[in-house]
Image (spheres, helix red, strand yellow):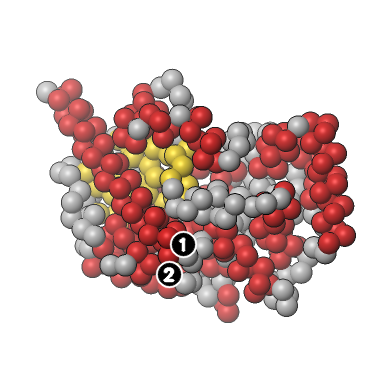
Amino acid sequence: MEASLFFSETYETARARFLEAATAAGGRLASHENPLARGPKGLPLHLDTAWFGPDDAETVLLNTCGTHGTEGFAGSAAQLAWMMTCGPRDLPPRTAALLVHAVNPFGFAWGLRGTENNVDLNRNFLDHNAPHPDNPLYDELHKFLCPKRLDEMSMSKMLGAGARFVEKHGQWALEDAISRGQYTHPDGYHYGGLEPEWSNVVLRRIVETELATARRIAFIDWHSGPAGDGELIYLCFSNPEGPDFARAAHWWGENALDPATVNAMWGSKRPSRRGIMFWGLEEQLAAHARLTGAVIEFRSARHKPSPAKTIRASLLERWLRFEGGLDAPEAKGFLEEIRDDYAPRRKSWHDNVIRNALACYRETISGMSEWTQERARAAD
């Protein structure tokens, strides 16, 4: 099939195609409706899963998409392409795959990155009974990062304040403070929330139930965003000195996981993180399973000529949520701008996403087969 045919125009269509393809490929399906939110025109929202392979498999591919809502278009297309090109049929013996579609269905349906509560799910997977991590520099930024209007004067004031912040703290401090995660401003950027989100609770329940007998988990969490045209950025959050990182490097290449490569493809030094799903699931599974994998980004945005353009998609999402509303006259145009950053419609991007995703699936499943055989030999 032409690569573009795997991409859907809406969450509703993407979900229907996922369920149809999973059924055709012999998957065992489960659906979880979000009781707390609705999509456009009252659309019900679901997190769906499809299991392929033996129920008692000890080596399992856990593949998620839509953690950051609108980034789900690429991950959904990748999952669809894998299911429709004999991926499930080609699983090695004693291995299985668990595909999770639309971890954050609210964001996917509305074309936003955050959840129904403006929570960044990749900052929400931590112990909410413990004190939340501090991000003192974000407090300094918040007051000028949240303009009531997006006119030229407001943007000029924001950029001026940002320039003064950079003079004082440096460029990386600006990027890190904005994106590492903050737990003090619910109307701000990369808000991690003060309790587990619905998506967090449901995904953990799925992992607890479906992966109870698993001992080896290969993990791919599809994302999109950094400037480029469908190339993959491998963000492995395992201990760099540990066996899980080494295994991921063996599967995907040492160069792909090298921080220098990652930073070059990201476009700058990668900011620090708090509460990411990778660490949350790694900790949850630690008692009985090893997790090897990565958050894998499809580069998608166009290169931006200025700081104002670079941050614009985030500004637009916040404005739509807290200032203008999703029914504002500007909403349709603003949502298209956001989508063009995370799920562009250009053919070259579609082609590269599908080609690179299928190659990544092949490498990962080959690695899973080796991993299974290693354990079998060790048990003999």
Q: Which residue bears the numbered disc 1? A: 73
Left or right position of 324 against 243: right
Q: Who is closer to the viewer here, 317 or 150?
A: 150
Image quadrant holding the N terminus, namely bottom left
Please provide percent x and percent y for residue 190: 66, 47
Please provide percent x and percent y for residue 214: 29, 39
What secondary structure is found at the residue carrying circle 2?
Answer: loop
Few, some or many residues within 10 Å of mark 2 (<14, 14–19, 20+): some
Q: Amino acid at mark 1?
A: Phe
Please provide percent x and percent y for residue 162: 81, 43
Residue furthest toward the left? 380
Q: Amino acid at mark 2?
A: Ser
Few, some or many residues within 10 Å of mark 1 (<14, 14–19, 20+): many
Q: Which of pointers 2 and 1 lies earlier in the amino acid sequence? A: 2
**Which residue does the image show at 31% across and 30% down from the upper left?**
250
Q: Can residue 30 be seen from the camera position used here?
A: no
Please provide percent x and percent y for residue 197: 58, 52
Q: Which residue bears the numbered disc 2? A: 8
- Residue 29: which disc? none
Quadrant of the rendered image containing residue 148: bottom right
As measured in the structure, the alpha-carbon distance from the residue carrying label 2 to the one carrying label 1 is: 7 Å
What secondary structure is found at the residue carrying circle 1?
Answer: helix
Rendered view: 77 above or below 63: below
Left or right position of 123 against 24: right
Q: Are marks 2 and 1 in contact (CB under 8 Å)?
A: yes
Q: Who is closer to the viewer here, 124 or 252?
A: 252
**Which residue does the image show at 33% across and 45% down from the upper left?**
360
Image quadrant holding the C terminus, namely top left
